[in-house]
Image: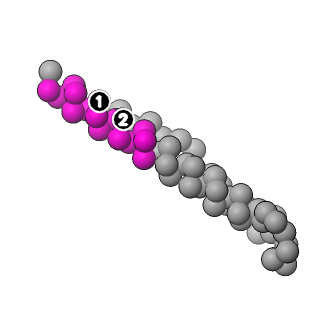
Amino acid sequence: MTEQQLDKPLPPADDDCCGGGACNPCVWDHYYAELQKWRIKQAELNEMAIQLSIEESSK
């Protein structure tokens, strides 16, 4: 089975966040949103790989 892997988003550097809690959106908000998109896309790719493997093995 061939698995495609996407680059996982990197968390912000320690000095990217001010720690004040007043930023909207915070760099962490952006990171978690990108991480969620990455998880969804990765799950879709994994599902496609599984389906492809099933189809190939049934030939």
For image coordinates 47% across by 45% down, the residue present is 42
Q: Which residue is mark 2?
A: 48
Q: Is residue 39 left or right of residue 14?
A: left
Which residue is pictured at 53% across the width and 41% down the height? 6
Q: Quadrant of residue 56?
A: top left
Q: Main secondary structure of the magenta part?
A: helix
> Which residue is denoted by mark 1 in the rendering?
52
Quadrant of the image for the N terminus? top left
Q: Is 20 covered by the magenta stretch?
A: no
Residue 53 horizontal side relative to residue 35, left or right:
left
Judge whether 57 appears above or below 32 on screen. Answer: above
The quadrant holding residue 54 is: top left
Q: Residue at x 29, y 38 (%)?
A: 50
Q: What amino acid is labelled 1 in the image?
A: Leu
Mark 2: give few (<14), some (14-19) or many (20+) Cα within 10 Å: some
| Callout 2 secondary element | helix
Looking at the image, residue 18 sits to the left or right of residue 1; the answer is right
Residue 15 in sight from this viewpoint = no
Q: Which mark is residue 32?
A: none
Q: How many marks?
A: 2
**Residue type, mark 2 in image:** Met
Question: Residue 49, how many percent across, how many down?
Answer: 34, 35
Does residue 13 lie above or below 34 as drawn?
below
Toward the top, the furthest residue is 59
Q: In this picture, which residue range is highlighted in magenta?
A: 43-58
* Placement of 21 over or under 2, stated as above or below: below
Q: Are marks 1 and 2 in contact (CB under 8 Å)?
A: yes
Camera-side residue: 2 or 51? 51
